[in-house]
Image (tube, rainbow, N blue to C red):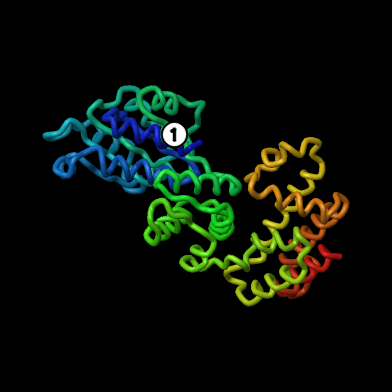
């Protein structure tokens, strides 16, 4: 898992085992920013930073500028730190760094923040950096992996979170780890280490309703709680900006697709792993499976696809989000 790799990199730096090159790349900027910030704040003392730490930006420089700065010797310090932010702006010429990567300056810590792109692993630069330094690829987490990430991040700081509270954050913020972490840090200012983050706490401090959200709508549908489901979509219709139809449709499609898969499992004991869900939420699929046989689930998936198309203007003229959701619920509950 990326978090384990990040911890390993930071532990090495903390122990004084820095590498001459850190090539931080990939779709998830959270880890790239985290490692870069740690190096920026901790490799040199405050006194050493004035002459020996430099931050450059890819759009303003060339590979030759990086190499010439990296080859400088530190002044009154053992190391110098050179951080290149937005290095992806140099993607067309990045392979020109090969010569330096093969023989880097041992007294320089060069950090390249190469966001939203990756090196071609078949080419020489990637292999050269891996040999002399660190190549770290920061991949996006799938949304079903984020609750576990939240739990692990909080555990490392002495906090806990209920499964529902973690799910609320994911539903509201998606898999943008920077946004999720920002909200977690706000909550950590309110509660003491050892305390638990609850749905109530999230509702009061982040503004996500603990009772009227997509997760509760999914549960109401799974339980065939018609009154609750219609109350939730009524709330959605009054707060459309915070509850976009596309998110609701995506979550329900995912839920019923997993429910269809659950029906087809021969070994229900392995259901949580097979569905890629937290075992805590398995009871929701067990309840829904009793309420919706496989044939009905297949029909509902078709209904969801139809509503998705109508929401995009295909086969429906100016139907509101509320009307589309009501139509979908009527078809689900019939």
- At numbered mark 1, what does the secondary structure look like: helix, strand or loop? helix
Judge by depth and name the residue closer to the eye, 55 or 222: 222
Quarter holding the C terminus is bottom right
Q: Residues within 10 Å of mark 1 (few under 14, many from 20)?
A: some
Left or right placement of residue 265 versus residue 144 in this view = right
Q: Quadrant of residue 48?
A: top left
Q: Quadrant of residue 61?
A: top left
Left or right placement of residue 164 versus residue 79 in this view = right
| Furthest residue in direction left, as rendered | 76
**Residue 274 screen position, x and y as percent:** 70, 38
**Residue 160 screen position, x and y as percent:** 47, 50
Location of residue 151 with respect to 227 vertically, above or below: above
Judge by depth and name the residue closer to the eye, 196 or 97: 196
**Residue 127 screen position, x and y as percent:** 44, 24
Q: Quadrant of residue 187?
A: bottom left
Q: Which residue is drawn at the image coordinates 48% and 65% (left, top)? A: 206
Location of residue 178 with respect to 221 vertically, above or below: above
**Residue 78 screen position, x and y as percent:** 17, 30
Tally of numbered discs: 1
Q: Which residue is drawn at the image coordinates 54% and 61% (left, top)? A: 199
Judge by depth and name the residue closer to the eye, 110 or 196: 196
Q: Which residue is mark 1?
A: 5
Judge by depth and name the residue closer to the eye, 196 or 236: 196
| Furthest residue in direction bottom, as rendered | 238
Left or right placement of residue 216 versus residue 328 in this view = left
Location of residue 321 with respect to 264 vertically, above or below: below
Location of residue 158 with respect to 229 vertically, above or below: above
Q: Which residue is drawn at the image coordinates 58% and 65% (left, top)? A: 210
């Amino acid at each position: 898992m990326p978090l384990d790799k990040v911890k390993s990199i930071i532990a090495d730096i903390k122990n004084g085992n820095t590498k001459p090159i850190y090539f931080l790349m990939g779709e998830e900027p959270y880890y790239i920013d985290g490692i870069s910030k740690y190096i920026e704040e901790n490799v040199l003392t405050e006194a050493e930073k004035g002459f020996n730490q430099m931050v450059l930006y890819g759009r303003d420089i060339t590979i030759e500028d990086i190499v010439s700065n990296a080859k400088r010797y530190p002044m009154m310090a053992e190391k110098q730190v050179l951080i290149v932010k937005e290095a992806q702006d140099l993607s067309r010429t990045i392979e020109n760094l090969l010569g330096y990567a093969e023989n880097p300056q041992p007294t320089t810590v060069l950090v390249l923040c190469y966001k939203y792109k990756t090196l071609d692993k078949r080419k020489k630069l990637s292999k050269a950096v891996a040999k002399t330094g660190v190549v770290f690829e920061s991949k996006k987490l799938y949304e079903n992996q984020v609750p576990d990430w939240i739990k692990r991040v909080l555990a490392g700081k002495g906090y806990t979170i209920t499964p529902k509270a973690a799910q609320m954050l994911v539903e509201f913020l998606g898999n943008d780890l920077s946004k999720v972490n920002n909200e977690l840090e706000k909550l950590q200012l309110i509660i003491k280490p050892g305390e638990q983050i609850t749905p109530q706490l999230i509702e009061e401090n982040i503004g996500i309703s603990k009772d009227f959200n997509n997760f509760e709508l999914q549960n109401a549908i799974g339980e065939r709680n018609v009154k609750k489901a219609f109350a939730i979509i009524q709330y959605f219709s009054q707060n459309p900006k915070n509850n976009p139809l596309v998110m609701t449709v995506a979550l329900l499609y995912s839920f019923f697709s997993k429910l269809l898969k659950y029906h087809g499992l021969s070994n229900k004991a392995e259901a949580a792993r097979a569905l890629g869900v937290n075992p805590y939420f398995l009871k929701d699929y067990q309840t829904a499976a009793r309420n919706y046989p496989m044939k009905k689930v297949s029909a509902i998936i078709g209904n969801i696809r139809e509503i998705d198309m109508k929401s995009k203007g295909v086969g429906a003229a100016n139907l509101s989000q509320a009307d589309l959701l009501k139509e979908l619920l009527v078809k689900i509950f019939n």
